[in-house]
Amino acid sequence: MACSFVKRASYHITSEEDISKIPDVKTAMMLLKSWGLDTKGLRSKDQALQRILDHWRTTFDEQQKQSDEKINRYVNDSSEKLKSNIEKLVAKFESMIRFYKQLSLTHQKSICEAYKNIEEIARSKIYNLKNSQSALVISGELGSGQTSFINLLLQSDILPVEEEGCTRTYCELKQGSEPKATLYSKDQSTMESKVTVLDMKEQTSKETLHDFITSANEMIFHEKVTIEFPFEFLESGIHVLDIPDHIDTSIPLEDIISDLPPNVVFIYVLDFSKLEHIETGKVEDFIEHVSRTSKHGFSYEDVMVVCNKCDVIPEEQLDDAKINARDKILKSCPELKDGQIAFLSVKEEQRLEPSGIHSEDFQAVCKAIHNSFLKKMEQYLKKEYRWLSQVQKRALYILKVSKLNSNKTLEERREMMAQVEIRIEKLEKESRLIIGRLHEEIDMEIDRLYSKLVEYLNSADLKAGMTVWLDDQCPKPDRKWKHLKCAAENSIVEKLREKLNEWEKSSTIKLKIQKQIINKFSEEVELMETHMKKIGAMLACGDSTAVVNLHRSFKHDSPVNLRSSPPSSTGKPQKDKNKLSDFVCSIGGFDKTVKKEIKPIFNKYKKETRSHHMFKATDIYIRCLIKNPQLKEMVAKYVKRFSKDINKIAKMIPDLIAMDKRLMSSLESEVMETKETIHVIPENLRRCLVLQGELDLFYVYEMWQLDYRLRDLEWNEKRKLGTGSFANVYPGHLNTDGQKVEVAIKMFKDPLQTNNISELLLEDETLRELEHDNIIKYYGATILQKGSPQKTYWIMIMASCITNLKDIYLDKKSSLKEDIPCKQTKGTMDYEKAKTAMVHYVVQLCEGVSYLHSKKLVHRDLKLENILVTKNREINLQMLA
């Protein structure tokens, strides 16, 4: 087992205490030999134990020191880099504020049209960056050792882990100089809240705390507990939240989750000792719940699954058991990755703890948690970078509009304003139509799902699964038939819920609905975005770069929320409607029209015939469900969860255009400003470009994820495929997934600087969005650092092509002369083949250009040398900056 520190034969050594318990000299000698140690001269058990102990201490001291140094160095290095990046980003925010404050009032007002209270928001973001908070949310199934796992992480015994008790309320643990616990409770009859503060220095306080956490009270809700303690192993700013499987509180879980900071890592603890009965469905339910209730966004990368109690599994079965458990978890939650599943024995860790040893399993868990927090913080920094980039690009756009329009006459401005107003009016009208079409699509999706559901409820598959009742699945007989009817309904509902969940998952119902709505939304929004760009180009007098840069900056953070949660309930928390089965099974049971059928069934219900009677009752229940008008209503509610924000999203784009309308109005007042104010616009524009360039350089150097490492690429700079004003292109190879792929490597001549980085990022992002057989494939980008002083160069990796149309049709040494009609004799088969080849090229060229136009892009440099040809004679349009 990985939990043991040293390799052993038949005796398990994890501490000095284990050595002292070696039963006899024979066992000690066998152990020494298995470790490769000399046994000569040893005549007694005590002598053998001393040699084992000496070896243990020597080995432990050296290996533990190396292990600790390795982990500490990794944690410290990554934490220092994160701290440095936060400081750098804060400096960028402060530079933006200083720049904003020295702009003219007109330009400040124009920026504030897009970002209300911009200075206040920016300072709030600076504060949050400097005082960033994180949370580790830990839940688990009953009996999994979840609380023991938390104590192990904190190297504390603050939470109760008695066998007869279990945690029954939310527990939040955080760093504090003075140990104290705050208990929150609520009287169920009066709903009055009470707060009790315990001084954890007193022994009685610990007993009171443990009793509050584990006990249930029929009259008092134990709402939650907040524990502040000088935990040695808990970094400042990180909270640990214990969410038990069974709670005795009136606070809905979504309220707890929604109050968490943006950076959250979720851990679910499973009881690994159950083997084939491991509760993977609970992991799925937990993930589904937190994904809906997290207001700061959710990623499956934020989740870890810890399988505890490895020590219970016989060692010879352990490897196979891990494989089976991992397969079950990944099958239940396919969005998770293998590295997000860990195996551990908390009990073994507790045995190792007195000697200061940490097993490889525990070290891996700690490192995974640290990595998860790093990723969350990196995502958070990227989000703040994008917000700052949006603001600065909006400022750039406004300054360019002002500069380009400063030479226009008042009459020319008014004419432009009239044209803008016409386009905005058209866009607003179109947005209303689009909202209508989106809702029509949702209604169609409701009809489709309802038809599928009814078809399934009538299917032989469901009937086969629902009408077979084992004796232990049937309710006990009851003299009162109405009581029996209620018990039967509950049993039928649970069985139906299970079958519906299987059907929903196997049919990928949810994914299909999401995909349908997203595709429709994307199509419709592209129509509106076309008008937006035209309006922006009019205001910027044709400066397309300013417009594209602005619009791409808004694309990063999509406001689409596909996981909308129902409103919080009051009183005792109940399970939220989440899956289709939750909506369907909430409709109710047998209706009044079947009373005459149902009553005889339950009046004759006996222990010997209960399976038969449940079969008949189930058939009637499903018939009632199908004809119930509420069934379609519930399907509608389920589908509409995925489209909650459509109105809000569709209205955002006209709102953005309205900002441009107000910008035009502000240009009227700008005419009245002094000449001195107008003269500073070019300087402000230059400063803003520098600010954005510096911000983008920071992003590339510190936050951007390289697509490939330099060692993944092979090329020879002495061989060139081509050269241009800005870059050279070399033939090369990309080593990926154990294979060598021929590629074209485009290396830019100038090093990365503030005046070129923003354009390169724009080109990179544009190429990533293109995917078509007749557009050259883009593999990604990396950077090369060379020279003294060291400079950084941008490298883009493209698919390799063997030639281009210029070389085929104009080069005397063409390698594909058979594709040139004029080189063939008219009327021959070769002439017809050459004509067919030319038509083939033209058709593909048209398809590539058509695809670009569908993406609202224009090539602008369409010439023969930019129309590449692959070895399979497929056209690839080369996209240039």
Image: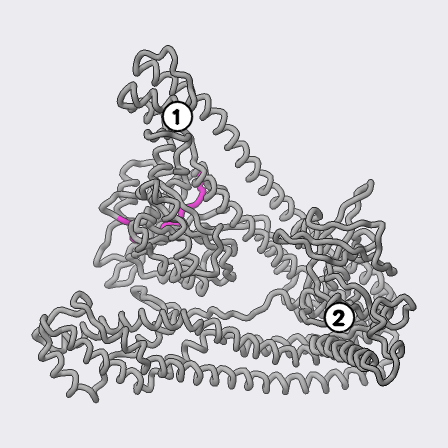
Distance from label 1 to label 2 (Cα)?
Answer: 65 Å
Which disc is residue 873 wearing?
2
In the picture of the structure, the residue carrying the numbered disc 1 is 34
Assess disc 1: are there few (<14), some (14-19) or many (≥20) residues with their C-alpha within 10 Å of its C-alpha: few
Residue 173 is inside the magenta segment: yes
Q: Nearer the viewer, residue 229 or 498?
A: 498
756 above or below 272? below
Image location (x, y in percent) of residue 267: 42, 52
Q: Residue 349: give its label.
A: none
Q: Please provide percent x and percent y for residue 138.
A: 40, 51
Q: Position of residue 798 (x, y in %)?
A: 73, 61
Query: How many residues crowd around disc 2 within 10 Å: few (fewer than 14), some, or many (20 or more)?
Result: some
Residue plotted at (83% across, 71% down): 805
Tell which residue pokes out farthest to the right in this image. Answer: 812
Assign a secondary structure to mark 2: loop
475 sits to left or right of 376: left
Quadrant in the rendering for residue 329: bottom left
Which is more N-terminal, label 2 or label 1?
A: 1
- Say above or below: 39 vs 445: above
* Residue type highlighted by circle 1: Ser
The answer to whether 339 appears left or right of 707 in the picture is: left
- Front in this rendered view, residue 733 or 367: 733
Task: Specify the farthest residue to the left.
Answer: 479
Of 298 and 784, nearer the camera is: 784
- Considering the numbered disc 1 on the image, is that residue within a helix, a strand or a loop? helix
Q: Is residue 199 visible?
A: no
Q: Amino acid at mark 2?
A: Arg
| Segment colored magenta | 166-177
